[in-house]
Structure formats: structure tokens, C-alpha cells
Image: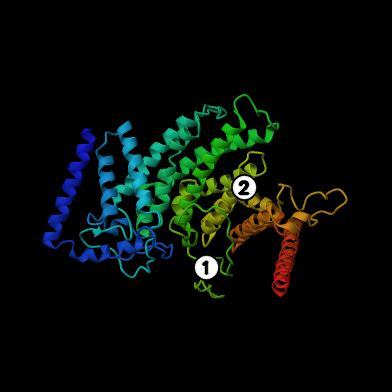
Amino acid sequence: MDFFKKGLSKLSAAAESAAAQARAGVSGASTSSSARDSSSRAGNSGPAGGGGSGLGPEGADPASLRDVRFNDRDPNESHVQFLWTVFEGAPEASQQQDEALESFLEGFNACFDGWFPPPSDGSNGAGGDGTIVGCADGHPTAVLRGLVSSLHRAHAKLEAALALGASGAQIRTDGPNALQRAAGLALLNACVVATRSAHNRAWLIRLGLLDALTALLKLAMHRLNVLGNLAAMRQPGGRGGSSMGTAAEVAAQLGVLELLCAHGASVLSNFLDADLRFGSIAGGLGLSDMSDDGGAVADRTGTPAAAPGARPAPESPAVKPLLECGGLTALVEMIRIQRLLHRAPTGSEAAARSLEGLLLRTLCAALAGSAAAQHSLRGAGGLEMLIEGIGVDATGTHDAGPAPPGGRAGEVTDGDLNGGDAFEALELGALALDAVRRAVRRNGQNAKRAIDAGAFGPRLVAMLRRAAVASAASLVRDGGAEGDRAGVARS
């Protein structure tokens, strides 16, 4: 229990230091920040946004930002601080450290589950001496550094749990609990929480979070790709190969790895676009109206739409480091794998469709206002992949493909009239089309490549036809339901 005592001694030293600062009046200027922390912590219904008053605008140099420390007068934050000091005192790379990290993450996620920093207009620049007391706008740099280093360790643990051999084909099934612990889902959830803050994002970019996260996602995608291809070859009720395992074992692995990718995509979304910042992992799809300037007209009630002549949205500060670590290529590959999974009999088709929607929206955010992202997408073959998604129906066949028996190519089906999976496929097609629109905007090379790949031909016409019929069918259904209710009221 030496590590526990060491943690307690650190906590005591921190408390004494805080008391000394208070007596000297050093922290007087920053106590106004702690007065806001209760309104920005769990249960806060404020807007999901970035910045943080007094911590600088989006993309600020973290060296210019004051550090944050937990407020020891707040019972929730003081508890998280205690758990953190216990983790810091644990021996490096030991079972005690793993257990202490698990306890800290549990406490951190519980304390800040509904935490959304207030948006910042950048008018209150950060700087000066001292620290900010309370986590109204961000978290201590030491904690952020710990999250990044823990992601590196999670990569090694996941690699060992998956037992990837030289060929990557070996499948080991030690049970979902073991894989879930190795996947670091609680750690990734803490990263989702932390990246809601512009202060935290500025530090996490410098600390290398995007590199660590991309490496972890690539590892998960490697296994998902193997599972998806083997599932496509599986015979009903049987095995797809000697190394694949039972359907239940495969479903367990798919569920954990898909959740890992969903957490990772949410972290990337937090970096790229405020409109995509989540309080929790999104389970469904949402389409936002799009403005002429290539940015999303805000989904939230009361947020004004962009003016017709407004400037294009500026490139996110996270785009450059995301491109440097291969994150955009990983996004493209994740979308391709999700399409494979929701067309194969894996039992995770609905989750794959939802995750594909989140990934497409994240890719759209990366492409907004970034010529570098546009060129990188073209180099990764992402344009062709997106265009394939424009004309794919719910069964995974192409709208512009061969005509069905007794019908015509792109013919409207009963699924279009009844909604369901066909409507979800239409939503995904619209998101893919929006990504193509952003990719070709003011980019002649991408526009030529998209035309050559058939982006604006029969595939698009078929999707528009389906959209028109689905819209009309929805109006008819809604009108019929209103009529039925009116008849019941009169009787």
C-alpha cells in the first residue's frame, strides 16, 4: 500500500500549497472561475461548445494558457483529485496502477458526465501567473497528459488481447469482459468528455492525443475488417473458418470494437466541429440543413442560420495534426468497414449504420474549409468510396446498377414507401453526397475526379428519385394518420 500512502502525501501537499496561495492572495483573481463550476459540471444543460472563458479561443497555444487545478472545496472534484493522486502514486506499469486508473476513470466520468464548458468568443485571453481553481473550463494538464499516456498503454493491451499474428488472421476469444477492459472504453469516454473543452483540446493536440487515438483506431479496424470479411463467408448456423469462432463470440468482439470506434469518432468530432460534440455516444443519425457556404446551419433551436454570402467555415486547428497522423485516412477506412459490416450477417448491422453516419458527419467537418483535407481525401481514394455510398440501397446493392426482374434500374421499391432500412440507407446516401459536395467545393481536381467516378450521373438521379418518393410517402402517411385521429375525435 506504499502507492496509496504516496498518493495521500501528494494530496496533503497539494492542499497545503493551495492554502498557502490563498493566504498570500495569489489565487484571489482566479476564484471567480470556481464560482461558475457548479453550473458547468454534471447536469449542466448549457450549450455543447468549446472554449472556456478566460482560457483562450479555439486553437490557442497551450503554452499561453494557465493551468487548472481541481477545486478541493467541491466534494465531487476533491474526490476525483484524490483518485488521481492515488493513481499518480501507484508503481508504473503495475496491476495497482491499472486498478487505480480504473477507479479514477470511473470517478472522472461520473463527475463530469454532463459537463459542458461555456462557449468562448476568445475575448478573454489566457495568461498571467497562477492557476484556475475549479474545472469549469478545463482540466489539469497532468490529467490530460495521463489520458494520452494511458491511450498508448491501451494500444499495447488491445494488441495483446486481440493476439494479432503476422498475418493478422488469428482470432482469439477470451470473452467480452477481457476484451472490453483491454479496449479502454472508460478511458475513451474520459477523452470524449475532456475534448469538449477548447482549453483541453489545445493541450491534447500538443500532447499527441490524435496520434495515440489514430493508432488505437487502426488496430481496431484491422480486426473489424477481418471479422467482416469472414462473416460475409459464413454459412448460416456454421463457422466462417477454423479461426473465426462461434457467432456469439464474433458478435461480442464486434460489439466492443464498434463501441471503441464510436468513442474514437466522437473524440475526433469534438476536435473538428462544435455542432458534433456529444454529451454521450450518439445512437442515431441526425441530418442538419446545409448552408451555401459549406458549413452546417446549426441544428439547435434559436441558433441563426449562416447568411447566404457568409465566408466559408475556417479550417479546424485539428485538421493539420489529423492529416499528419493519418487520421483522415483512418476515417475513410472506418466508413468502408462499416459498410462491409452492415451488409454482412454479423448481427451488428444497425450499429454499423449508425456509426457510419457519425463517421460521415465527422469527415464532413474535416473537409469544411480545408483544401489540404480535400487533397488528402482524393489521395486516399476517399472520393470514390463516398460516391459509391450515394447510390446504395438498404440491401447493399447499387441504385444505378442492373434492373431487377420485371423492373427498371433505380426503380422505387416498397421499402422506399414504407421507410425502415431503406430510409436509413437514404440518410447515409445524403450524408455521403454532402461529403462529396464539400470535397469538390472550389477544387477543380476533385470535381473532375468526382465526375469521372459518376458522382453526378445515374447514381445521383436514382437517389433523388428515391428521396422524392420517400418524402411523398411520408406526407401521405402523416396525412392518413391525421385523418384517422380526426375521425376518432368526431365519433
Residue appearing at x 48%, y 50% in the figure: 323
Residue appearing at x 53%, y 29% in the figure: 173
Residue 350 got which mark?
Answer: 2
* Residue 60 falls in image quadrant: bottom left
User: How far apart are the two marked residues, 1 and 2, measured between alpha carbons?
Assistant: 26 Å
Look at mark 1 in the image and give the residue it sits on: 298
Structural crowding at the residue carrying mark 2, measured as other residues with C-alpha within 10 Å and reported as few (<14), some (14–19) or many (≥20): some
Residue appearing at x 52%, y 49% in the figure: 328
Q: Secondary structure at mark 1?
A: loop
In the image, residue 10 above or below residue 357: above
Residue 464 got which mark?
Answer: none
Q: Is residue 153 visible?
A: yes
Amino acid type assigned to the residue bearing label 2 in the image? Ala
Amino acid type assigned to the residue bearing label 1 in the image? Ala
User: In front here: 379 or 95?
Assistant: 95
Location of residue 453 in the rendering, given as x and y in whole percent from the top left corner:
70, 52
